[in-house]
Image (tube, rainbow, N blue to C red):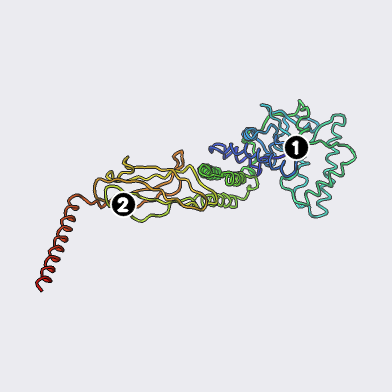
Amino acid sequence: VIALPFADPDLASIAHRGKNVSGTLSHLQNASAVAATTVETILHVKPSTDFAWPVNGAVDSSIVDVATSAGAHNVIARSDSFRETTELPYTPTAARPIGGGTTAVVADARLSTLFDGDMSRAGSSTRAVQKFLAQTLALTEQTPDNERSIVVAPPRMPTAAQAQTMARALEGLAGNRWTQPLDLVAAAEVKPDPRATSKVPRAAAYPKKLRAQELPTQAFQDIRTTQGSLDSFETILTQPERVVTPFGNAVNRSMSTSWRGRSLEAQQYRDAVRDYLQSLTSEVQLIEKSDVTLSGRSATIPVTVQNKLVQGVDRLVLRLTSDNIRLKFNDDGSMAELPVRIAGGHSQSVKFDTATSANGRAQVTARLYTEDGTQYGEEMTFTVKVSEVTPTVLLVIAGGLLLLVLAGIRMYSHRKRTVASD
């Protein structure tokens, strides 16, 4: 069992349009690891992840470089891309060393394309089987005494009819009539033919039709943005694996070869992934706050942080800043920070001690940050109105109270004398 990197990333698109976008190549190694785990979990077979398969087996040096960065040492090419430069009278063995410990496994183009098209009609299916048997016999008769390994690369996503036709063609070779079966790993390890070409095609030789179907550079920039949001979101979660794993797989799917020729659907998928992630990150937010009025030299300002996620968040910091130097937080300055930790489905009121030296208004900005200083979510602003009670005001109030008390005493004395005279 051969496992390609998870979601079958488009190596040519990455090589030609994505590798210069930071972080793109790092997805490939992760995709290879996920593929191995997935296959082993479902099929209970340890697969080989040492193979890369560019679309239609079309390769150039940049595609080979990208394939090896994913950990592959074998690249499945095709003979219509990896053309022979010498006039060999026979089809050589598939394995070709191309340097750096990498082997190109060159599939036969004629055999590999026989099963393309609609195989649901009996006539088409029968002709494909007959051509397959005839051409394998012809390959054998080229040099009957020269045993070679020939690789056939089927359609990338075969229909049921195509798969059934291929099965009938292989059944026609049963009984070792002129071929023997060989698995792909063994075919890649066969001693190469020294006369066969081992020169990787130039970038200019890459088919224009395939290049026109590639993912644009913007696609990889979108992926980088989504991955950056995911990295920031991960740092505050108490159970990050519940988010990182599914979204990591979704990012890998964004680079799949399945999007070739489907640019609109590819853009819609990337947008859907980004929007869903944004909807999750926005579940942790600041609650809008009305203007605050403070009386006295010191007071407390509460700011509420809400967590609508089903898991807790941690390693968040709430920062308040004031545009008025007369309003200080914790007697320290115009900025203050406090840690935030909230269980899933709860809210937390974070209280900041303030001190003021004069009356007036101050614009206060509240914003969440991750522990590494990255901004999280949207900022919130509110106005703080300081109405300090000064000593003069206190004297006036005290004097007024004293007058009220004296007036009360006088009224009481007067009433008491009136009652006594009666």
C-alpha span from label 1 to label 2: 73 Å
- Nearest the viewer among 348 and 419 is 419
Q: In the image, 254: left or right of 377?
A: right
Q: 210 left or right of 358?
A: right
Determine contact: label 1, label 2, CB under 8 Å: no
Residue in view at x 29 percent, y 52 percent: 294
Label 1 packing within 10 angstroms: few (<14), some (14-19), many (20+)? many
Instruction: Say which quarter of the image contains residue 175.
Output: top right
Residue visible at 84% across and 43% down? 170
User: What secondary structure is found at the residue carrying circle 2?
Assistant: strand
Residue placed under numbered mark 2 in the picture: 384
Which dot marks residue 107?
1
Residue positioned most to the left = 421
Residue 73, percent from left and from top: 69, 31
The residue located at (23%, 52%) in the rendering is 389
| Amino acid type for the residue under numbered disc 2 | Val
Q: Is residue 277 left or right of residue 132?
A: left
Question: Is 406 placed above or below 35 here?
Answer: below
Say which label, 1 or 2, has the lower sequence index. Answer: 1
Q: Amino acid at mark 1?
A: Ala
* 19 horizontally vs 156: left or right: left
